[in-house]
Amino acid sequence: MKVSELSIAEQAKKVLSGIDELRPAQEKAVRAGLLDGMSLLICTPTASGKTLIAELAAVKTILEHKQKVVYIVPLVALAQEKYREFKARYAGLFNVALSIGDYDSADGRLIDQDLIITTSEKLDSLIRHHAPWIMYVKTLIIDEIHLLNDVSRGPTLEILITLLKRMLSNVQIIGLSATIGNPEDLAEWMGAVCVKDLWRPVPLHQGILVGNEIEFRNRK
């Protein structure tokens, strides 16, 4: 499937003009309803193209539905990285904001932002401070969603997803992960379609390192 065939705004296609063909997981996500508002759990290897799946959902929501997207990442450093990346890529198309730290604020400036990159702890704080713009969120993207199983971050993330599903009746949730042991169960809890794929850009080989030599297993 080609990017030019996607049902997204032409401005977005121009931004993504350097990408011709979708990778397998990306095509599976589109066919599973990514651009139709379906909630999806994406379980594919590292570097298989999960971020672009999230971006496609975001541009659809922002440019066509005129609603907001929240992109949750686990670390402040990763939030800053995503912010710089998306702000540079989508400059002129829509507004990208970073919301981290200052847990005693509703961050009113976000009412005028389209794509909001934050952490689960900050989003939890924003909800507790009754940030009015939350009601305009259409798509919720959760990077590293397997951290639901993390003893420190998992409970906050689980409560966030539960709250937002109740607050936003038609919210689209896109969960991204390379490592989930029970993806079907998690997808059912999310109310999402599970999209799995094993394709990776670089072959993965398993081996045992002894001294300075590696003995690979099942390497062809």
Image (cartoon, rainbow, N blue to C red):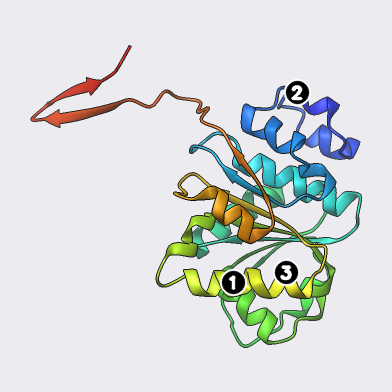
Residue pointed to by mark 2 = 1
Q: Which residue is mark 1?
A: 100
The alpha-carbon separation of the residues under discs 3 and 1 comes to 22 Å
Q: Which marked residue is nearer to the observer: mark 3 or mark 1?
A: 3
Q: Residue at x 18, y 22 (%)?
A: 215
> What amino acid is found at the position of numbered circle 3 in the picture?
Lys
Q: Which residue is mark 3?
A: 165
Picture residue at 56% right of the left edge, 56% below the top: 186
Q: Amino acid at mark 2?
A: Met
Up the image or down, 129 lies above or below 156; here it is below
Camera-near label (3 vs 2) is: 3
Closer to the camera in the image, 6 or 41: 41
Q: Position of residue 105 (x, y in %)?
A: 67, 85
For residue 74, above or below residue 39:
below
Asked whether, in this view, residue 67 is left or right of residue 163, the answer is right
Closer to us: mark 2 or mark 1? 2
The quarter holding residue 66 reads: bottom right
Residue at position x 68%, y 33% from top? 28
Viewer can see residue 167: yes
Q: Quadrant of the N terminus?
A: top right
